Amino acid sequence: MEQGNTAFVLFSAALVLLMTPGLAFFYGGLVKAKSVVSMMMLSFGSLALIAVLWVLYGYAITFADVGDVGWIGIPHIIGIDTAALGLAAQVADAAAPAGSIPELAFVAFQATFAIITVALISGAIADRAKFGAWMVFAGLWATLVYFPVAGWVFNFTPEDDGGWIVDKLGAIDFAGGTAVHINAGAAALALAIVLGKRFGFSKGIMQPHNVPLTLIGASLLWFGWFGFNAGSQLAADGVAALAVVNTIAAPAAAMLGWITVEKIRHGKGTSIGAASGVIAGLVAITPAVASVEPVWAIVLGLISGVVCALAIDMKFSFGFDDSLDVVGIHLVGGVIGTLAIGVFGTGVGALFGFGFGQLWAQLIGAGAVLIYSFVMALVIGFAIEKTMGFRVRAEDEIAGIDTVVHGEEAYAFARGKD
């Protein structure tokens, strides 16, 4: 066991876990004041539920053929034995895919990916979703979609380089452009369709209630993203260092691209636009963080900032209400970053004379995840809507759902209460 790499992965896991509360702040500031508790609880609820499911069976589904720590979940789901049920606290130093860290460190690191992916989806249904219905959706979607899809990308084995998308298809996804961002963005689009539009939905009518809260959330997300990207190397080495530099450069460039679009279109570059640009750049660089040089990371950041700033208006053109632009940022940004590898990825990009084979592989991988996630989320979402109901009552939505759903108010002191 290599202690330096183990410490690096464990610290990276802590950084990625911080991203989910950071996302709660980011999303919470963007909704109206009487829905902020509900919005933030969708993220915290995801953290609680998916962490438990990951230990019970999520890791076993995603990494069915990896390692010897059989008590983490139910290996292969069929053929259960007592050790597989978690009744024996067997802690082994079984090597993780990188070969130099305990498998349990890898279990913890990948758990945080599952948590944040599910939480990302919630931004599409802000101001109108029942908490209980969301928790049912989160559990089903994680089980039927995230765990298998993560296996397609991250399931490293001693014999293979990854799941079928990475190993068999040959696509490159270093830290989750497909498994995390395209996956969550496609599911967000499906849920936006299932729940329908908010009352009063129109361009400019829904304004963020707390800009500083959103900026704090964006800052925490950027901070945690260093663990997300660099930690995916599973070793504190030169590749991780490249990932850190690119995780600085790309979102910074994306911020500049986004606020430039705002300035040209609306005459002002906003702080919300700056924060959104940072997230767009982080999303885009995620799959490509080890495949592009820093200068090209800047190019990728600029492209993602500009395109995502334009893409968020798609919901008005196509008539779906993606409340907090999960589709425009995560789905679009994830596709941009995934395809960019085939264009100017080091040693594979068509721009450097390596042909279009890599671009084709990237396109198939992105398309497979997008279609599977969208269809499954649509089916799960409609099933919940037709049974227990997914959307709150109209009068509750108009008044603000915090007190109805959670019995709390974020800013009760504003009315003179203690």
Image (cartoon, rainbow, N blue to C red):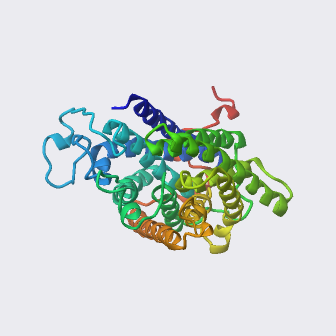
Residue 25 percent location from the top left of the image: 60, 41
The residue sitting at 22% across, 49% down in the picture is 75
Judge by depth and name the residue closer to the eye, 286 or 145.
286
Residue 44 percent location from the top left of the image: 48, 41
Judge by depth and name the residue closer to the eye, 170 or 218.
170
Quarter containing the C terminus: top right
Judge by depth and name the residue closer to the eye, 19 or 257.
257
Judge by depth and name the residue closer to the eye, 302 or 263.
302
The extreme right residue here reads 267
The residue sitting at 34% across, 55% down in the picture is 143
Quarter containing the N terminus: top left
| Left or right side of 339 for 8 | left
In the displayed structure, 354 sits above or below 218; it is below
Would residue 24 be visible to someone looking at this image?
no
| Left or right side of 28 for 175 | left
Numbered marks: total: 0
Residue 296 percent location from the top left of the image: 66, 56
Would residue 98 be visible to someone looking at this image?
yes
The residue sitting at 56% across, 51% down in the picture is 289
| Left or right side of 134 for 297 | right
The answer to which quarter of the image holds residue 70 is: top left
The residue sitting at 41% across, 41% down in the picture is 109
Residue 336 percent location from the top left of the image: 60, 63
The answer to which quarter of the image holds residue 402 is: top right
The answer to which quarter of the image holds residue 45 is: top left
In the displayed structure, 378 sits above or below 95; it is below
